[in-house]
Image (cartoon, rainbow, N blue to C red):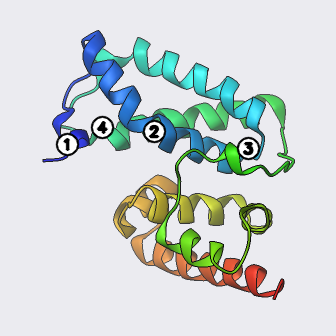
Amino acid sequence: MTRKEMINSITTEAEFIQMYDCYYSKIYNYVFFQLLDKENTEDLLSEIFMKVFEHRASFDAGKAKLSTWLFTIVRNTLSDYHRKSKHIGHWVPAEEDIIDARSDVETAYMQKSDSEYMLKSLSKLGKNDRTALFLKYFMNFNYREVASHLGISEKNASVLLTRALQRLKTSMDDRI
C-alpha cells in the first residue's frame, strides 16, 4: 500500500501534514500549468490549502478518493480565480518553477530539448490540453478520471489526450 493510499482521513493535524507532503508538488504543478505564473501560483496554493484545512472534516473516503476530493477544491478555486481576475497567464519559464515533475513524456522530450523550451512548448497548448496532459502523465489519472475532471466523456478524454500529445510533439519537433 502506498503512502497516498494510507491517507483515508485528514481530520488530525498529523494527517493533514501527511496529505500536504504527499500532494503539495502535484497541486503546485497543476496550478502552475494553469496559470503559467509562479507568484500567482504560490498565492493560490495558500488559498487552496486553507480551504482544504477548513473543509477537511467533509472528506469522506467512502465517497471519493482523496486526490479527487483535493482536485475538486483546486479546480473550483482556479475557476473562482479566473472568474474574478479574468487573468490570462504569461510565461516566464524557469526550470525551478516545476517541482519534481518529470513524467515519461516530458523525460523523452527533455532528451531532445532543454527544459526552458519544453516549458515554452507546453505554454503554447490550450488550457484543456495542458490540464489533460498533466492529469494523465503527472498525476497518473486514468481516462475515466481525466474525463470526470474535465466534464467530458471517457472517449472524448482519450481523443483530447491523443491530440494534445500530438500538438506537443509537433511543437517540440518545430525546434529541430
Q: Which mark is residue 5?
A: 1
Quadrant for the C terminus, please: bottom right
Specify which label sits upstream in the sequence, 4 or 3.
3
Residue under pointer 3: 35
Q: Residues within 10 Å of mark 2 (few under 14, many from 20)?
A: few
Disc 3 is placed on an element classified as helix
Q: Secondary structure at mark 1?
A: helix
Name which of mark 2 and mark 4 comes first in the sequence. Answer: 4
**Residue type at numbered disc 2:** Thr
Q: Are marks 4 and 1 in contact (CB under 8 Å)?
A: no
Q: Give the residue type at disc 3.
A: Leu
Secondary structure type for disc 4: helix
The disc at residue 66 is: 4
Tag in front: 1 or 3 = 1
User: What kind of residue is marked 4?
Assistant: Leu
Q: Viewed as shown, does residue 94 lie left or right of 62?
A: right
